[in-house]
Amino acid sequence: MDTWTLTLDKLDRYGREQVRTVNLTIDIRDFKERAGFAWLLMAANPHLSITDIQEVLTNVGEQHARPVGWITRRRWLFHGNGKVGARPNADSLDEKARTIMAENPSLSSRKLAYTLRKNGVPRGKDWVRQHRVAANPP
């Protein structure tokens, strides 16, 4: 099993260095009866189409069946910062949008989309949701 050893920046209460071992590989079959199985399936199979994901989830168990909209709204998380092969918008306002989003990290996607439109950047709440992580790096 692949693991990663992480040394935390913060010392424990006794002044000792804190080290954690993080597993990088899981077997999603162990999660077939859990609510997060659909998420794990999407993460492990970014090559599958939405229809394929739907079919697999339904065949694994009826409790995992998800509508197309549910898969579409969440699948982008496993493809980087947007849809596969995403390109900048033709109006070249993406950088301005990211600057405004970075200045307002606590606003909801809907309010942020409104703020962007008010500042001359026509972007919807779905675009904001998919790109706000890139605008606010850790």
Image (cartoon, helix red, strand yellow):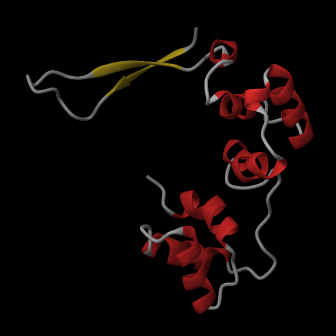
On screen, residue 66 above or below 13: below
Q: Quadrant of residue 79?
A: top right
Residue at image coords 48%, 56%: 137
Q: Position of residue 36 (x, y in %)?
A: 62, 30
Residue 101 position in % (x across, y down): 52, 72
Q: Is residue 51 left or right of residue 13?
A: right
Q: Residue at point 16% right, 26% down?
A: 12
Q: Is residue 100 above or below residue 43?
A: below
Q: Quadrant of residue 37?
A: top right
The quadrant the N terminus occupies is top right
Name the residue at 79% across, 58% down.
86
Left or right: 21 as drawn, with respect to 31: left
Q: Is residue 76 left or right of residue 14?
A: right
Residue sitting farthest toward the front: 62
**Residue under the image location 62 percent in, 68 percent down:** 128
Q: Residue 83's x, y, as percent?
A: 78, 54
Task: Name the residue at the top extreme.
Answer: 1
Q: State the image quarter where residue 112 is shown.
A: bottom right
Establish if 43 lies above or below 114.
above
Q: Is residue 119 visible?
A: no
Count of numbered circles in the view = 0
Can residue 73 be seen here? The reply is yes
Residue 14, position as x, y percentages in the image: 8, 22
Q: Nearer the viewer, residue 99 or 59?
A: 59
